[in-house]
Image (tube, rainbow, N blue to C red):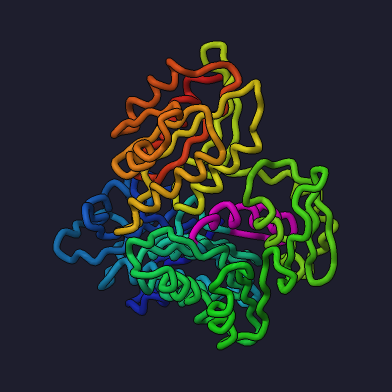
Amino acid sequence: MNIWTIKEICKILDIEKIKSKINFSGISIDSRTIKKGNLYIPIKGKNFDGHDYIDNAFKKGAFASLTANYQKIKDYGKPIIFVKDTQKALIKIAQYSRVRNKNLVTICITGSSGKTTLKEWIFEILKEYRPSYCNKGNLNNEIGMPLTLSNMPKNTKFCILELGMNSPGEIKRLSKIAIPKISIITNIGTAHSGNFKKLEEIANEKSDIFSFLDKESIAIIPGDTRYHEKLFKKALKNTKNIYSFGSKDSNEFKIEEKMQKGFTTFKILNQRYKIKNKNTFLNWEKNIILILGLAKLLKIKITTLLPKLTKLKPIEGRGKIKKITIQNKVITIIDESYNASPESLHLAIKNLENFNSSHSRRICIIGDMLELGKLSKSFHIDATKTIIEVKPNIVITVGNHSKFIFQNLPKEFLKFHYKNYDKVLNKLLRIMKNKDIIMIKGSNAVNLHLITKKLYELGK
């Protein structure tokens, strides 16, 4: 499938036409994974410069490359497109991709946690109805999100984009590129609070997702948060189409009854839907109510969705559950190893209550929660309250910050602490018993996902 012509690229970047009839199958910024027919855009980072890999990109099959490096360019025998700034060029291509599709509905999602799973679930549902597209993996920053839009097929009708935030101003910059038709805030929590002085600042930053809405656009906000009024007022500056979700009666999308005989009742714009929940995933209700609300607003018949909703499962690193056999022992892994915030750690530990059985032990492996700034110590100590409440059989903490969890757990807990992840696997293999439930949770940089990966490799 051809997404771009070299003529279009030159027009977008406002540079002299190149005498060529090349068509590009996509855009790539990584010479290692580039595909034949791609346009290569070298990005300069803190520790690398993509310009050093132009030669490799051509060897892998790139048809052309941008460059902002006028000094090192040699004759590659293929087109080189000169620009002042390659990252800005990527953003221009993304913006053009967004606006050239006149009937595109862009659904943008931000929040302190739960963005990726919600994005994937919405995509899984909407792709059954119209051509749909979304960020791959965690491409949600100021390079990844524009790259996603730049690779969007021309016939896309629903584009679901996750917008991440690490620093002030990022959500506004991403929203300016994406121009959301529907903006969703999942929650306001403490993730990345080390970069902000107050939680209120995080709410302000998240609400910037409404900055480029128009009167026909839609805003969906959490109704049970204390920042609801602030979010509502921010959205109201651009649109009156504002919907709240949660458990309160005032919400247009309401969770009415949780898990009554395996079913949850939702009220969407005064219409009730009863859905069977086959998951132990604690954010299931919140994700489902947002999907139901979206379907209603997009005029998709909800009754046709119901069988599909029950098949949605947590994704890898974000609650995926898998049974494996190691050393003739059947164990269940709850993989939460991708990231961690105080709110998501609380939910992950509470989720173990769904696995409460006299025949199984529950093992918690908890790594550091990062980017929490001065509040890091208190957030880690607070986590012990949930652990004491849930009473897992074994707690293993990993890293510098999680040591506060280890130190503040009562002596009667069976607990272990390691500075790094690499010794945890050997400990697990020594203490594991048949039917153990192992929950693994921590910030991505702690590398707990490597424990999960090794367990999968050893298992069958």
Q: Examine the rendered structure and indicate whether residue 244 appears above or below residue 342.
A: below
Along the viewing direction, whichever of 403 and 150 lies nearer the viewer: 403
- Residue closest to the far top: 328
* Residue 129 place in picture, x, y as percent: 74, 59
Query: In the figure, is residue 388 to the left or right of 242?
Result: left
Q: Examine the rendered structure and indicate whether residue 353 appears above or below residue 227.
A: above
* Residue 36 place in picture, x, y as percent: 43, 48
**Residue 61 seen:** no
* Residue 89 place in picture, x, y as percent: 35, 70
In percent of the image, x 46 and y 40: which residue is there? 441
Quadrant, the N terminus: bottom right
- Residue closest to the far left: 71
The magenta region covers 112-133
Whether 122 is among the magenta residues is yes
Q: Examine the rendered structure and indicate whether residue 47 appears above or below residue 430.
A: below
Along the viewing direction, whichever of 445 and 392 lies nearer the viewer: 392
Query: In the figure, is residue 49 to the left or right of 253?
Result: left
In percent of the image, x 34 and y 42: which residue is there? 404
In percent of the image, x 57 and y 61: which residue is there? 153
Along the viewing direction, whichever of 45 and 150 lies nearer the viewer: 45
Query: In the figure, is residue 287 to the left or right of 138?
Result: right
Quadrant, the C terminus: top right
Whether 79 is among the magenta residues is no
**Residue 394 seen:** yes
In percent of the image, x 55 and y 55: which residue is there? 114
* Residue 180 place in picture, x, y as percent: 56, 74
- The quarter of the displayed image where residue 301 is located: bottom right
Q: Examine the rendered structure and indicate whether residue 430 appears above or below residue 204.
A: above
